[in-house]
Every structure is written in C-alpha cells, then in structure tokens.
Amino acid sequence: MTKRETIVAVATAPGRSGIAVIRLSGADLTAYTQRLVGRPLPARRAVLSDIYDAHGEIIDQGIVVFFPGPNSYTGEDVLELQGHGGAMVMQLLVKRCLELGARLAEPGEFTKRAYLNDKLDLAQAESVADLIDATTAHAARAALRSLQGAFSERVTELSVALKELRTLVEASLDFPDEEIDLLQQADARSRLIGLRDRLAAVLLASRRGSLLREGLHVVLAGQPNVGKSSLLNRLAGEDLAIVTPIPGTTRDAIHLSLDINGMPVHVIDTAGLRDTQDLVEQHGVARTWASIERADAVLVVMDSAYGETAADSKIMNRLPFRLSCIRIMNKIDLSGVAPIIDRAGNRVTVWLSALTGAGVDLLREVLMDMAGWKGGAEEGLYMARHRHLEALEQARLHFELALPLVAQLELFAEELRLAQEALASITGRHTTEELLGEIFSRFCIGK
Ligand code: GDP
C-alpha cells in the first residue's frame, strides 16, 4: 500500500441522475488536471469547466473541485469532477482518466487511503460504511457519532489509562527492590478494578450500538388470511419501510425492514416456503430457510377466533428450536378479546388487532425487550461492530485474568499488555493487511 497509484471511481450511484461525481485520488494530480480541464485549478474552489478527451474534444461541462493533499479526504491530491449524471458521460470520463494512467479504485479504497494517511482511525473508517448502510435515523446518527470519533475517544481514554498503569508496572519490574512500595503506592489493584468497570460500561453501550447496526431479525409465519400483511403495514406505520434486499447483506430472503422506536427490525417472510419442483423457487426456499437459521425470533400470526391450528403447529415444529417464538392472536376486534401480553408457560402470546391497531404497541414492547432495547432508543449511542465487541470482550478477559496476579508481577504485566493490544486493534494501531482487506472490501466503490 505504500505504492500510491492514482485511483478513479464514480462516487455516485449508477443510473440516470441530474449530477454524478467522479473522484480521483493520487500523490500528484497536477498532470491530470492539466489534461482534463486544460489549466491548473485553485485549491478547494468550485470551478465551472469543460472536461476534455484525448483529442481536445469536450466530453462534458461541469463543476470541478481540486483538493490538494494533505487537506483532502484521502490525504492525497483529490480531484472531483461533477458531470451530468448519465451512464455514457460517466463512462467516457472514467475512460479518459484510465488513459491518463489512473486505475479503477477498489471498494472502500478512498477511505482506506484516508485511514493509512491518518485522516481517520479504523473505527471511524468503518463507521463511514455503516452510515451509508444505515436503515433507521437512529442508526445513521449513531454511525455519524462514531465517525466523529465518539467511540474511538472512549476506547482511547481507556487505552491511555491502561498505559499509565502499565508504565508503573514496568517500572516496578525494572527496579525490583522498590517493587512492593511502588505498586502499593500506585494501588495497582484498585486502578485495575476501575479500568475494568469503565470497560464494562463501554462494552454495554457498544452492544446496544451494534444492535442499531445489525437489528433484530424476525421470521413472519402463519396461514393465509390471518393478517400477516396487515400486521406488517401496521408495524411499518408512518415510518419509511425500506424494501430489501438490503445492499451489502447476504440475507436476501428478507422482505422488509421496519423501524421500531429506532431499532431496525428485519422481517423475513415465509410466504414462499412451500414444497416445489421449480428449481429457481427451490433456491429461494433454501435461502429463506438459511435466513431463518440466523434469525432471532419468529412471529406466528393466527386468527384469535380459531387459536393455534394443526397447520400452525406444523410450521412451528419445523422452525429451529432455539428461535424465540411469539404467537400473535390477531383480529381481536372480531373475537372481542382485550389486547394483552400473555407469558404463560414458555410462550409469549400477544393478543392484538392489526386492523384497529389495538395491542400493536404490546408487540413492539415484546420485540424491544427481546433485543435488550429497554427504554427505547437513547441519545449518545455510537455504532459498534461485532469486531469491536470481540476486542472489548478480549480486553475484559485479560483484565479479569490480571486481577489475581498482582503479586506475580511479570504475569500481571503480560495480561495488561494483551488487554492493550486488544484495545489497540479497535482503532487500528495493530492491524494486519488481511483485516484491512476484509473491512474495506465491504465498502461501496468510490467511497
Ligand atoms: P395475510 O394473508 O396473512 O397476509 O392476511 P392479510 O393481511 O391480507 O389479511 C387478510 C384479511 O383479514 C384482510 O381482509 C384483512 O383486512 C383482514 N384482517 C387483517 N387483520 C385484521 C384484524 O385485526 N381484524 C379484522 N377484522 N380483519 C383483519
């Protein structure tokens, strides 16, 4: 990655649009500017200009902006060409840049360069992708907070405090005669307990933040006409329901994503689950079963006038045992039952009416409880990924292992060192090329 070729990509989504943007990044774009617009450009100013091909013919007219490094997104020279948003115009512009020596950017490569040039730390770079992929307003805000460094700051604070403790411990190792004194003075044990508790608080907030990213995956099942679509529409309410497939996820059997009090809920529809000879359909059925395997809960909708039928029991018996099951007794406006959550036995049953909306709030409550989303969405959450949670867990484990070892200074020091390494992996001080590849390959091209 030290070899910095010039990269180019269309930064806007494909298709027809008013404007589309091409981005170039490289160590020195002076020659590109000269060839593309025929003159040097001022720094960070929008300039209306013609953009030329190799024969001096005009490809497009648009706004061009030049960001000389290091004051740019990537930290290198960046040139943005804002042209007309047609596929052919964009293709010609990209082709021209390739002729001039640039190569097509890989997914996330602009952000990767920003990371490698210390414009962002790794957790911030990841939140760029999370912001783009956010499906609820809360998720978008949490990702933005991470991008602005809220999560990294808390991790860095912990890391700095840990470093102080380690410095003391290492000093005691170097001067064994004063060992006991120094450490007693420093009160290493209670410091470590303080650190452990702070880490636990960060971990808790991060778990909730990761829920905003992942959301709750629920399977929707039930016989025809019991009111599944009506219930979905009711749950979606006024909110913008995003129709899937969600870009970038492999859970393509998902039917709909809802926003329930700020928590993303992804609904996997079982409508297509039937025995079939059709190969394409079989493929779809297999995918739906695969997403059911990874789901958190199943909602089995029934008509409250009939209760659980043999067909319902059959569906429920086919579902993975570990899935939490919520039975929905719908149409209580007809059967005259009051809306209620019934937690008798091991089953949760919610009595409601998709038509009138009575009891639908009870279902929202059950779903939020299930996700550990008590008290609804909070301000101050930041986006965290599975990778971050694992690293925090790892650090906590080493704190726990260190606690009984205060008297065995070398072992104590080693556990603290491992905890520090785990924390550092979050913001990216100790990352491998492999991990970077894995993180950035999931970005969109041009970001
Ligand atoms: P699906 O086949 O399970 O998706 O069922 P639909 O949502 O299409 O509903 C089937 C019929 O039941 C429609 O005519 C709905 O208007 C009606 N329905 C759905 N929920 C209720 C309800 O809570 N009360 C009453 N009275 N009718 C309902």
Image (cartoon, rainbow, N blue to C red):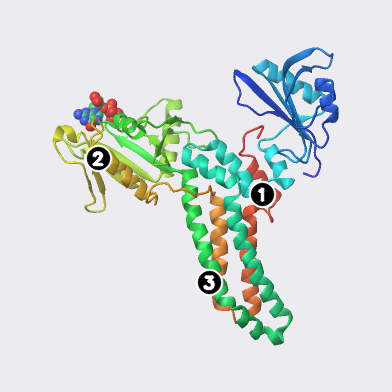
Q: Residue furthest left?
A: 336
Mark 3 and mark 2 lie on one chain; the one further toward the N terminus is: 3
Tell me the residue that label 2 is attached to.
Answer: 359
Secondary structure beneath disc 1? Answer: loop
Which type of secondary structure does the marked residue at label 2 adopt? loop
> How far apart in space, not on screen, are marks 3 and 1 (Cα)?
28 Å
User: Left or right: 69 with respect to 337?
Assistant: right
Q: Is residue 2 visible?
A: yes
Query: Residue drawn at (71%, 33%), measured in percent from left and top?
Result: 105
Q: Amino acid at mark 2?
A: Gly
Asked whether the residues under the numbered discs 3 and 1 touch, taking CB atoms below 8 Å apart as contact, a structural biologist would say: no
- Please tell me whether mark 3 sits on a helix, a strand or a loop: helix
* Residue 401 relative to residue 374: left or right: right
Q: Using the rendered view, name the quadrant where residue 68 is placed.
A: top right
Residue beneath disc 3: 193
- Residue at 66% in and 69% down: 164
403 is higher (above) or lower (below) than 240: below
- Residue 307 badge: none
**First of labels 1, 2 by sequence position:** 1
Q: Position of residue 249 (x, y in %)?
A: 52, 37
Q: Residue furthest bottom?
A: 177
For residue 408, say whether it is visible: no
Residue 121: give its label. Answer: 1
- Crowding at label 2, few (<14), some or many (≥20) Cα neighbours within 10 Å? many
Q: How dense is the environment of label 3, judged by Cα within 10 Å: few (below 14), some, or many (20 and up)?
A: some
Q: Amino acid at mark 3?
A: Ile
Cβ of mark 1 under 8 A from ligand 1: no
- Residue drawn at point x = 39 percent, y = 46 percent: 296
